[in-house]
């Protein structure tokens, strides 16, 4: 199990969670942040600092956002396990689930 970042993060990317993460496992895509499931140590430090309540323990993820468990994992299919988000910076990509969403404030 791991923590998952869901839809409320899209187009917000506050990054308070990134600052709190002790293992640097929260990566930044073009429109959202993603938690690497193999690098996350399940400490929960990220969850309470998220201002839009987008981070959930996988078992607690609301049903309407269950697809974000897969989206967070699949985001890393081509990246593998880089061993820390700060090494990569902002990535010019998003999972197709996120990329397909209309920009925040629209639709």
Image: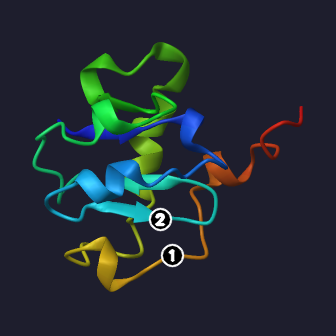
Front one among 39 and 73: 39
The answer to whether residue 94 is visible is: yes
| Towards the viewer: 57 or 89 | 89
Characterize the local packing of mark 2: few (<14), some (14-19) or many (20 or more) Cα atoms within 10 angstroms: many
Report the disc number at residue 90.
Answer: 1
Q: Report whether residue 80 is seen.
A: no
Which residue is the extreme one toward the right?
107
Q: CA distance from mark 2 to mark 1?
A: 5 Å
Give me the residue at 14% from left, 58% from top. 22
Q: Secondary structure at mark 2?
A: strand
Disc 2: which residue = 28
In the rendered view, tell whether residue 16 sits above or below residue 50. Answer: below
Residue in the picture at 21% in, 39% down? 2
Q: Are marks 2 and 1 in contact (CB under 8 Å)?
A: yes
Q: Residues within 10 Å of mark 1 (few under 14, many from 20)?
A: some
Number of callouts in the render? Answer: 2
Above or below, comparing residue 54 to residue 42 in the picture: above
Relative side of 3 to 6, left or right: left
Q: Position of residue 74 (x, y in %)?
A: 42, 56
Q: Which mark is residue 32?
A: none
Res 62 quadrant in image: top left
Q: Quadrant of the N terminus?
A: top left
Residue 18 locus on image (x, y percent): 33, 57
Residue shown at 26% from the left, 21% from the top: 59
Residue at 60% in and 70% down: 93
Pick whichever of labels 2 and 1 is earlier in the sequence.
Answer: 2
| Lateral position of residue 106 relative to residue 61, left or right | right
**Which secondary structure, mark 1?**
loop
């Amino acid at each position: 199990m791991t923590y998952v970042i869901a839809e409320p993060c899209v187009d917000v990317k506050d990054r308070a969670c990134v600052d709190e993460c002790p293992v640097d496992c929260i990566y930044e895509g073009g429109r959202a942040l993603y938690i690497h499931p193999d690098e996350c140590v399940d400490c929960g430090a990220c969850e309470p600092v998220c201002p839009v309540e987008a981070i959930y323990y996988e078992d607690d993820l609301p049903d309407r956002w269950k697809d974000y468990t897969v989206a967070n994992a699949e985001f890393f299919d081509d990246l593998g396990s880089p061993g820390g988000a700060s090494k990569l910076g902002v990535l010019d990509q998003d999972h197709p689930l996120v990329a397909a969403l209309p920009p925040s404030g629209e639709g």
